[in-house]
Amino acid sequence: MMKDRLSGQIDLAGLFGTGAAPLSIKTLALQGDDVARDAEAICAVIGSPSFRDGGAAGMSRPGGLAAEVLKAWHRSGVDLASQLHGSYALAIVDTARQCAFLATDRFAIETLCYRADGQMLAFADRADRVPGHGGELDPQAIFDYLYFHMIPAPRTIFRQVRRLPAAHSLLVDRNGAHVQRHWPLQFDEQHRQSFAPARDGFRDLIRESVAEQITGHQRVGAFLSGGTDSSTVAGMLGQITGKPAPVYSIGFDAEGYDEMAYARLAATHFGCEHHEYYVTPTDLLDSIPAVAQHHDQPFGNSSALPAYYCARIAQADGCTKMLAGDGGDELFGGNSRYAMQRLFEFYHHLPPGLRRAIEPLCEDGSPLRRIPGIKQATGYVRHARVPMPDRLQSFNLIMQLDPASVLNPDFLAQIDLNEPSRHMQATWDECQAPSLVNRMLAYDWRYTLADSDLPKVRGATQMAGIEVAYPLLSDRLTDFSMALPPDWKLRRFKLRWFFKEALRGFLPDAILTKKKKGFGLPFGVWATRTPALRELAEDSLRTLAGRGIVRADFTSRLMAEYLPGHPGYYGEMVWILTMLEQWLRRHDTQAAQTRAAR
């Protein structure tokens, strides 16, 4: 059983002085010694927060990390979270103020889940470890998973449990439970600066961020995909240590998926100690159940499995910590959809009258839709007229397939198909930056980083028993990116213009111009060629249909017709359904054990 890193259960009646019994702080646990108490409060912290004045909590200050955070709480109260930098999750119970306070860092590098029912506040760093969560699954969360391939905060797979969104805190007092953002999404789009000093400052910040993360470790390695972000981190790691940096890369023996050549290029350029591993279909058979069941809720990012193998070989090689390159795309404008959405935004600059005249000609029944060349132009109009952020999900897999054809009718009746759209709109509205690119970046900080990529890497490294850090997501680099002019991130249609120009001469030109794939998994291709892998998927989908979640006729068509015809496209649906079923099997086991223990 996984050990709690941070968990607690607070009797609110005792805290607020409304019960006969005094305050009872039950099962408060923390891995390590990061718990501090005084006459009025108790504080528990995980991660590595630092204060705005530059002092690292628990490093140079006496008393330890939690003690310093508790002192800051007594000075500042709920404003504490806005004064902390770095990765952290914390819980404070204050009997004098009669409140409990939970908070997570800017990107939810460390996570915190909770349930609050007016009588009890329970929390843990994992949704499945929140005391008393009851185990009741939320059908809407399952649909959210099928829509996003993960479950965005604040919802979790458990009906009674919520996850604190990134950069948010929870205050529970006599007035109830209040969730609020402690780090505002404020971009400085008017700031102008010269390129040369900005470039030099940027390089210095990367170097400082990498240097901070290797302190106290004898051997630190780095993920290396061959993209700009991981190559930058690997190169800086070698420069700082003055010796070949241990770097770890994953390859696939499948056309269109392997980019080991770029990883080798970066490793040679920086003189790294390069370790390669080629994931095979047999690896998938061995690891799919374990990877799916490690996560605290269903998780469908298919890069999770190769990331696990990468972390595992690093741990076996003696590394105690890995550096990941996540964040560069989302801070500096590196995803191709940023340029694509700029193209679609041009349509909205046309006069409204002209748009009203054009749009009827682009409907399904229009004869123009049957003319090659013009059909593509009508497709542009049809796509461009969808408002942001819904446009980002115009080709969402389950919506393209039609939920009614995928989901069991009884299950479909329990969910709201429009809930993901409302969630996206609320996230989009949080950031009021004038430029499209900055609003998309802030949007991706939630969906791409906090709810998908970071849980992927966190889960992979936890399974492998190794620490992980994200130097490109340091608060100083984040603040730096938020003060860059928007056209330094997306210049016309050129992605991450400043990032690449600032690192020209440091990174090889071939890496600056390549298209990043990362550790994408050729699951669909392999499932059509490997009988045992196909059998695993078919067994998972049959069982999932038997649970009444998906339609049996859909899973049959998916495996017999859709997957063989387009394995790269439909393989993603097979993957997320397989991972859902594999996670549910672990949940079944835990539920049975709970019933037996009663």
Image (cartoon, grey):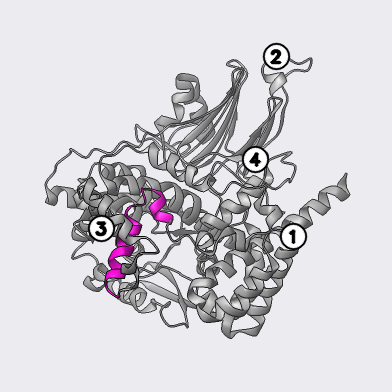
Q: Secondary structure at mark 3?
A: helix
Query: What's the residue at 18%, 65% (across, down)?
Result: 505
With 82 as the anchor, is 302 left or right in this view? right
The answer to if 173 sits in the magenta stretch is no
Label of residue 17 in the image: 2
N-term-proximal mark, 4 vs 2: 2
Look at discs 4 and 3 and give the one toward the viewer: 3
Cα distance between the residues tagged 1 and 4: 22 Å
- Asked whether disc 4 touches disc 2, contact meaning CB atoms under 8 Å apart, the reply is no
Let me know if residue 363 appears in the view: yes
Residue 31 drawn at (x, y percent): 62, 44
Q: Residue 547 shows which numbered tag?
A: 1
Task: Name the residue tied to disc 4.
Answer: 161
Main SS, magenta residues: helix
On-image quarter of the N terminus: bottom right
The segment highlighted magenta reads 372-393
What residue is drawn where x is 39% and y is 73%?
Answer: 273
